[in-house]
Amino acid sequence: MEINQSAIYKTKFRLLGLSSTPGHQMLIFWIFTLMYASALAGNFLLIIAIGVCSKLHTPMYFLLANLSMVNLCSISITIPKMLQNIMDQKRTISFSGCIVQMFLFVWALGTEILLLSFMASDRYAAICQPLQYMFIMKKEVCVGIVTGAWVVGMANSVVHASLLLRLSFCDSEDINHFFCDLPSLWKLSCSDISLNEIMAFAADVIFTMSSCTLTLISYLLILRTIMKIQSVKGKKKAFSTCSSHLLVVSFYFSPIIYTYAKPSSSNDEEEYKNIAIIYSVVTPVLNPMIYSLRNKEVKETLTKLLWRKKTF
């Protein structure tokens, strides 16, 4: 891979963060520290619960455990560095560190999108094809799906990182963001970024749009099946098995589509930062809460785990 030499001499960037007002810094620090701790605790507990409870050793929870691992990765890539920058006030990040952060975050983002769409397909198989469910979602298929999601997510990230390394960067070192995201780095480039934007749009179509389409088709088929169920109790039970996933998907996809499908301009930096908070910070915090509070089996397992720890 040919790397533009001007990129090599760019030794560092400055992450401006969410606010430049000194009075807001400690408030932001404690809010995001609390959110980070909540995301770590919630996702770790969910993974442990799925691991120790034999009733949760099903395809849906296997996908959910991987989703929690992705959530742990994505929030750990961005928040610790932001908190460090608030404390030391230097706000600097090395060029290589910035590229690595961008690479890992895009990897986690792509993997999470694919996992969410596969979880919709799992719900379709469970509700619409219950007799063939264990054959459709057998162990080999689940492992292949999850492995494919991680590998394809990494391949997508390699493409974006490679294209970014070919750019020349201007004198400005200030990134108006709290982490190294693609649109923010493009704004510092003196090169033509049209290819970068085209590939980002293509990835958005391939990953997000196709995942949304797959999810929408799955839920339309699920809705058609639910409407055929005669009893109200049966309809509620069928809908409850996919309501958590539907809530997460509806909350997660829209800001990502908006961020990466919209061409960059000089007036949307603050908007990008605010939207990025939703899918990079808020979602990893809410996901384990949504799946735990709306799922009886997970709640029972977590209650037993916490009670055992308290008794011990």
Image (cartoon, rainbow, N blue to C red):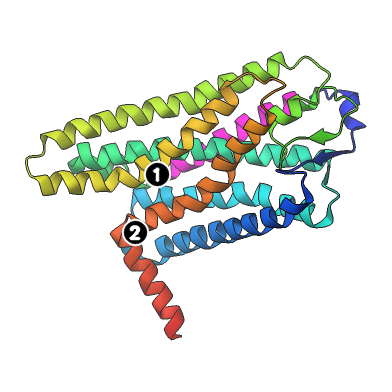
User: Which residue is nearer to you in this view: 103 or 170?
Assistant: 170
Circle 1 residues within 10 Å: few <14, some 14–19, many ≥20: some
Measure how far apart labels 2 and 1 are at the Cα level.
14 Å
Residue at 53% over, 63% down: 41
Residue at 30% over, 31% down: 218
Task: Look at the image and give the residue range highlighted in magenta.
Answer: 142-163
For the residue labelled by badge 1, is the local secondary structure a helix, a strand or a loop? helix
**Which residue carries the number 2 mark?**
56
Q: Is residue 57 visible?
A: no
The mark total stands at 2
Looking at this view, name the residue that lies furthest to the right. Answer: 9
**Which residue carries the number 1 mark?**
142
Magenta run includes residue 117: no
User: Which residue is nearer to you in this view: 112 or 248?
Assistant: 248
User: Which residue is nearer to you in this view: 252 or 210?
Assistant: 252
User: Which residue is nearer to you in this view: 255 or 209?
Assistant: 255
Q: Amino acid at mark 2?
A: Leu
| Quadrant location, the N terminus | top right
Mark drawn on residue 176: none
Q: Name the quadrant containing residue 140.
A: top left
Magenta run includes residue 155: yes
Q: Amino acid at mark 1?
A: Cys
